[in-house]
Amino acid sequence: MKQSTDRAVEAPIDADALIDALSPALGLVVDPASRPQVKAHLEIAARMAALLLEHKLDDREEPAPVFKP
Amino acid sequence: MSEALIDKSAAEIADAVRSGEAKAQDVVEAALKRIEERNPTLGAFTDVTARRARAKAEAIDRRRRRGDKLGSLVGAPFAVKNLFDVEGVATRAGSKINRDDPPAAKDATLIARLEAADAVLVGALNMGEYAYDFTGENAHDGPSRNPHDPRHMSGGSSGGSGTAAASGMVPLTLGSDTNGSIRVPASLCGLFGLKPTYGRLSRAGTFPFVASLDHLGPLARSSGDLALAYDAMIGPDAEDPAQANVAVAPVAARLSDGLKGLRIAKLGGYFAASATAAAFEAVERVAEALSAKLTLEMPGASRARAAAYLITMAEAAALHLDRLRARRLDFDPEVRDRLIAGALIPNPWIAHAQKFRRWQRQETLKFFEAVDVVLAPATPCRAPLIGQKTMVLDGKETLVRPNLGLFTQPISFVGLPVATAPVWTKGERLPIGVQIIAAPWREDLVLRVAHALEKAGIVAAPVAAFG
């Protein structure tokens, strides 16, 4: 199957809401000039996440990094 | 003689110094002269460690006169991406902010190891800010330019590492590669590059980007130099907790073992879409030379890229959170806005990505039961123009900055060893690279294949004509 760089996976995300809710909680300032870029990056991330989350994981799947005490 | 010698490989320089045909001091002077002549145009170096280099070269010449044993890279000048600690130099990692840090107290492990092999450090190299970059552009130090056509990008984020080696300032450089930052500049600048297996080389004494995905490795104008440098740098280092506990396996002695018995295939699917014709033609040319007729699909490639993309955003944002709060105006805006977005993404995406990485690892290990080496484009296109923001792939306008690494990112996601080899087309001024990929810990295979292609004249990394 042919796959393009950013497959048209629908990614419902309200980037403005995320920015408004989380940036003050994290102590981050998003300047008006930066907001369109931050939004665009969040929307790309949401498309990437939608593609990734299509792959269902077993509940018992382990994450990749293994902490060795 | 030294002027011509600086165009040679590190191995040839070492032979000349060892035999007494050349003095290490003359080689270093030739390198410093080259840097002085070419760097103002090309923007490769941010720090030149001339005094230290001259002292090291003088010591080498003295030891040679005494008949002391000399290292495998004796007298070969090298330089490192400026995220490596260099004693006495602030580790700027491409940023404005970190140059306020105190100078590094000691060299990074890999620098110490190359110098233990008698290579000579001559300086630190330009890079994309905090390594979050595939272009080689830098808002504070200016771009590192492509020596084959300075209007074009070097590729990044190890941009200066590409520019310095391709322009003949030094035969050998070190870079870092989280999602493609060695392989992209190697492709765009026409160099051999090696991204070893994740956990193979010590990262001690370097400024991080994404702990889950960061690798270090060499760029050079020959596969032999990659092998010599790699052999000098391998081995356990108690100072790097991320290093894997695997047997030390030198490669240089087996570099000429040839292709016999190797099962080599092209990667299809994800790796056969979304690129310019130049990228696919380069893979075809290499595949034909290797008689690689089979095309295989690597499972999960597009999701591997997505997962790497998200882990990168999240870990990089966490690393830089305090700086984003306190000094947001001192960042390159292009980097800052990606980092801020990374701080805001939902955590379940990252947990899923790290679990997917385990799944991808298992599938990839199974995949390599049927094949030894696979081939893929290194970049979707030849070097874009400096400042170019978009490119057309598959008839679709696509952002340059994140997408130059679209073929490298799924491979490093599971830490596979990769050599990049440069392909040239008659009538084209700029090269393009092919990734030669193997199963974890098989650096020997990717370098053997790169070497066979180099000997057959299919790939090459000439010094760029200057001026």
Image (spheres, rainbow, N blue to C red):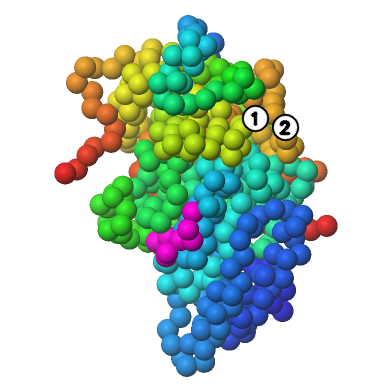
Q: Is residue B77 above or below residue B99?
A: below
Rendered residue at 59%/55% (across/down): B125
- The x, y position of residue B22, in whole percent, is 62, 82
Question: Marks 1 and 2, how far apart in space?
Answer: 7 Å
* Snapshot quadrant of residue B183: top right
Mark 1, Cα crowd under 10 Å, few <14 / some 14-19 / many 20+, is some
- The x, y position of residue B176, in whole percent, is 49, 48
User: Can the viewer see residue A14 in this picture?
Assistant: yes
Residue B84 shown left or right of residue B364 in the figure = right
- Marking on residue A32: none
Q: In the image, which residues are magenta?
A: B101-109
- The x, y position of residue B193, in whole percent, is 54, 50
- The x, y position of residue B107, in whole percent, is 44, 64
Disc 1, disc 2: CB below 8 Å? yes
> In this rendering, do the residues under marks 1 and 2 share a single chain?
yes
Question: Going from the N terminus, do you reach mark 1 or mark 2 first?
Answer: 2
